[in-house]
Image (cartoon, rainbow, N blue to C red):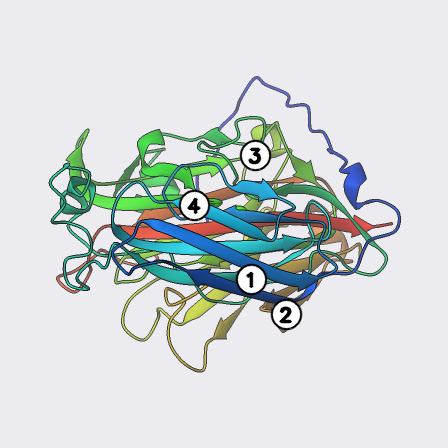
């Protein structure tokens, strides 16, 4: 997500590295053989019984898929649960060996024997109106790739698993408004806090088509500047992407000296960018930007899925960044590497902070057209930073 403007802030951030002691020392192996059985007395019933079995599990974390409710954390193998209303729910079971190492399974449940076409909208209590307001039948993908919870010789130093019912403001700050010249790229959206939600263990950034403060679209942009910044390590971000012409999701980083050095002297690492549209919804880009003898330089590579698009299911977007190189991966498959030892790449030997955003339009993707549907959403399951022991 290239930024072409320079902003000077009379502000020096304090960038801290948060340690996660839980991940230090000996790491337990991941659980295995997770089996989930869901039973009901009658198909119309809103009560379910869960029977769980697995090996090496110390506790289960269960998301019933009812929006913003907290997950149930339990050591029991048999659980009863009653859904508040009929509908379709993604039930996700995580079998944990510790706080971060787990395996999971997701099942889609039809609670109350709802008609597949209705999707719960016929409910007289009015709760189905949420779906009607949205006017689409989107749901969080239940499938996709995951990444290991640990790596040999590395330690988890920071993570946000997007638990709870709101963005953790110890980690993140909203960037709102239109930026300067549409965030330097003539982007078409107005960024607001309302377009971000945290539910069922996911961060969801929604881009909507709606007139707001002189713009035709709304979305969100969040950053860890001044709260979480890192130099080197392995970064894994599990996300499902939006799609469509003019849709531009980005998971990226800026050098922590950005307020004083400006761009591109701060350096920029784009872990994942996609400019959506037919034939492009299956391709992501990994890029660095820096200043070379006073000029903007950049170097990038891309990765395309053999089948489907990035909106279909979750994928893990990663970089491995060390004093010699930055290497980009999708689902563990390497697709781009850059040597950062040359002097002109000194930008990449300092702390960087994260920015996640979902832009609409702009110089690179171009504008949405008649084929683009709204709302579009970028869903992030987790971001994790591992560093060498
Ligand atoms: Ca999560």
Report which residue position mark 1 lands on.
316
Which disc number belongs to residue 184?
A: none
Circle 1 SS class: strand
- On the question of residue 120 being in view, the answer is yes
Residue 184: name its quadrant: top left
Query: How many badges with numbers are in the image?
Result: 4
| Residues under numbered marks 1 and 3 in contact, where contact means CB atoms less than 8 Å apart | no
Going by the picture, which residue comes out furthest to the bottom? 306
Q: Residue 179's spot in the image, x, y percent? A: 36, 33
Which disc number belongs to residue 332?
A: 2
Q: Is residue 286 above or below residue 6?
A: below
Report which residue position mark 3 lands on.
224
In the image, which is nearer the foreground, mark 1 or mark 3? 1
Distance from mark 1 CB to nearest ligand 1 atom below 8 Å: no
| Residues under numbered marks 1 and 2 in contact, where contact means CB atoms less than 8 Å apart | yes
Question: What's the CA distance linking mark 1 and mark 3?
Answer: 20 Å
In the image, which is nearer the foreground, mark 4 or mark 3? 4
């Amino acid at each position: 997500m290239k930024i072409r403007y320079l902003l000077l802030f009379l502000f020096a951030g304090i960038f801290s590295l948060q340690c996660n002691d839980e991940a230090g020392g000996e790491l337990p192996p991941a659980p295995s053989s997770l089996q989930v059985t869901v039973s009901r007395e009658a198909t119309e019933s809103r009560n379910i019984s869960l029977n769980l079995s697995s090996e090496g599990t110390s506790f289960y974390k269960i998301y019933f898929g009812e929006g913003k409710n907290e997950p149930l954390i339990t050591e029991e193998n048999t659980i009863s649960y009653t859904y508040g209303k009929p509908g379709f729910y993604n039930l996700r079971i995580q079998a944990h060996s510790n706080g971060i190492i787990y395996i999971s399974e997701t099942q889609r449940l039809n609670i109350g024997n709802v008609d597949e076409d209705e999707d719960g909208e016929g409910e007289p209590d009015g709760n189905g109106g949420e779906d009607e307001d949205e006017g689409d039948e989107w749901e969080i993908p239940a499938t996709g790739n995951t990444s290991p919870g640990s790596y040999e010789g590395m330690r988890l130093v920071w993570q946000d698993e997007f638990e709870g019912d709101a963005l953790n403001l110890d980690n993140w700050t909203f960037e709102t408004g239109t930026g300067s010249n549409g965030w330097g790229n003539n982007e078409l959206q107005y960024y607001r806090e309302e377009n971000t939600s945290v539910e069922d263990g996911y961060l969801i950034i929604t881009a909507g088509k709606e007139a707001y403060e002189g713009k035709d679209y709304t979305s969100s942009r969040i950053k860890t500047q001044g709260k979480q910044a890192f130099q080197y390590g392995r970064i894994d971000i599990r996300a499902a992407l939006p799609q469509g012409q003019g849709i531009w999701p980005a998971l990226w980083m800026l050098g922590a000296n950005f307020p004083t050095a400006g761009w591109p002297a701060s350096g920029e690492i784009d872990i994942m960018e996609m400019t959506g549209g037919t034939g492009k919804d299956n391709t992501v880009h990994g890029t660095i930007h820096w200043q070379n003898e006073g000029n903007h330089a950049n170097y990038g590579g891309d990765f395309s899925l053999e089948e489907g698009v990035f909106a279909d299911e979750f994928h893990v977007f990663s970089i491995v960044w060390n004093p010699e190189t930055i290497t980009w991966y999708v689902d563990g498959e390497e697709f781009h590497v850059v040597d950062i030892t040359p002097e002109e790449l000194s930008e990449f030997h300092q702390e960087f902070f994260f920015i996640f955003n979902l832009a609409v339009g702009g110089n690179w993707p171009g504008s949405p057209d008649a084929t683009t549907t709204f709302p579009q959403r970028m869903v992030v399951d987790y971001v994790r930073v591992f560093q060498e022991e």
